[in-house]
Image (tube, rainbow, N blue to C red):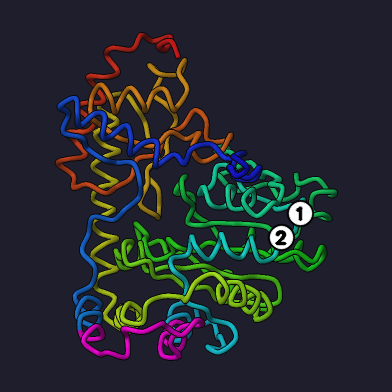
Amino acid sequence: MKFGMNQRLAKLPPYIFVHLGNLKREATAKGHQVIDLGQGSPDLPSPVAAIAAAQKAMEDVKTHGYPIANGLPEYRKAVAAWYKKRFNADFDPEKEVLPLIGSKEGIGHILMAILDPGDAVLVPSPCYPVHYNGVLIAGGVPKLMPLKEENGFLPDLKAIPEADLAAAKIMILNYPNNPTGATLPDLTLLKDALALAAKHGFLVLYDNAYSEIGFDGYKAPSIFEIPGAKEHALEFHSTSKTYSMAGWRLGFVVGNATAVGILAKLKGFLDYGVPSFLQHAAIAALQGSDEPIRKASAAYQERRDALCAALKTLGWDAAPPKAAMYVWTRLPREARGMTSLAFCERLILEHGVAITPGSGFGPEGEGYVRFSLIQPPAVLREAVARIGTYLKTLNTAGAAV
């Protein structure tokens, strides 16, 4: 055969959540009732107003044709109004807002639209997989910015080699962070990143998908709370976590008009954008009550507390995050001789509990695991009970890999 996987795709390992999905099916076939704490897919209901808006829009034959590539003007205006309300940031709905088929799609496509083969991108590690894999697919070269626990899982921008800064076309940042749950104590990191962008001419991609899921009073910022940020940045957001609408595939990007235009051009060739009836659902969510957001945050906070307390009974200390929907923690002492992947594979296959190995988020994630808070407290406690049984099978030196 003359065809096959291209070199860029061949460099990628199997997507971690595809691998976990295969293991969950295998565990189910063995008779386990799997408790899934792996992929961060919200189990909470989408807003009633969004569902009603989608249903009503679907009855209009005008929504049955191809959507407008750049999105409905009403949707772009709703996004701009939401940003003004939430962050006091102003955007031109015509030039600085673009609907996306989820923020993941937008991040992957902007990398394809901007990068030439060999271009450098400053990427955090650990990170949401598309931040790294999207660079490889686009032919770019990731330059890793380690996120160390001792630094609050924030990158040390001063440690980035000058040559990497000079070569970079893009820097990617993400707070509240997936997978670590880390948050920004203030705007210092974002200001410093923008200063470097101004000096070296690169674009900052700020993934702010978890800004609305906060605990203990924490409110996440936008990079566009900083004056002048639009000269050097794009910010990606989505309804997936904010409104528990992950399956609807609704997102948006705001920021630098030139970069937004570049992304819009690529999307015009590759997709027709978000289905119109779904855009009406997003409008209803953005313009509706904040009560669904408050309820979601309260639910995740309750789950966070239940999980961390249950893990503590096993002698496994996990720091409670201030935001997002994950608990990120080092492997327990009983498993310190294992890789995170081996630990998670055995946990799924032998005990029917799915969590995500830290190595699936990059090399700096090795030695950690991520719990997704996508089950109610009682189920989380049952998962921890199973983990306790598992840990008893491991000796203190760690099991063989």
Q: Are marks 2 and 1 in contact (CB under 8 Å)?
A: yes
Q: Residue at x 21, y 26 (%)?
A: 386
Compared across the picture, whether 89 is left or right of 371 comes to right
The answer to whether residue 192 is seen in the rendering is no
For the residue pair 118 and 366, the one nearer the viewer reads as 118
In the figure, 158 relative to 32: above or below?
below
Q: Amino acid at mark 2?
A: Leu
Quarter occupied by the C terminus: top left
Looking at the rendered structure, the secondary structure element under dot 2 is loop
Q: Position of residue 122 (x, y in %)?
A: 69, 51
Q: Give the number of the disc on residue 115.
A: 2
The magenta-colored residue range is 56-79
Compared across the picture, whether 229 is left or right of 69 comes to right
Quarter occupied by the N terminus: top right
For the residue pair 170 and 184, the one nearer the viewer reads as 170
Q: Position of residue 287 (x, y in %)?
A: 33, 84
The residue labelled by disc 1 is 119
Looking at the rendered structure, the secondary structure element under dot 1 is loop
Residue 125 forms part of the magenta stretch: no
Q: Residue at x 59, y 57 (%)?
A: 173
Q: Position of residue 5 (x, y in %)?
A: 58, 43
Q: Amino acid at mark 1?
A: Asp
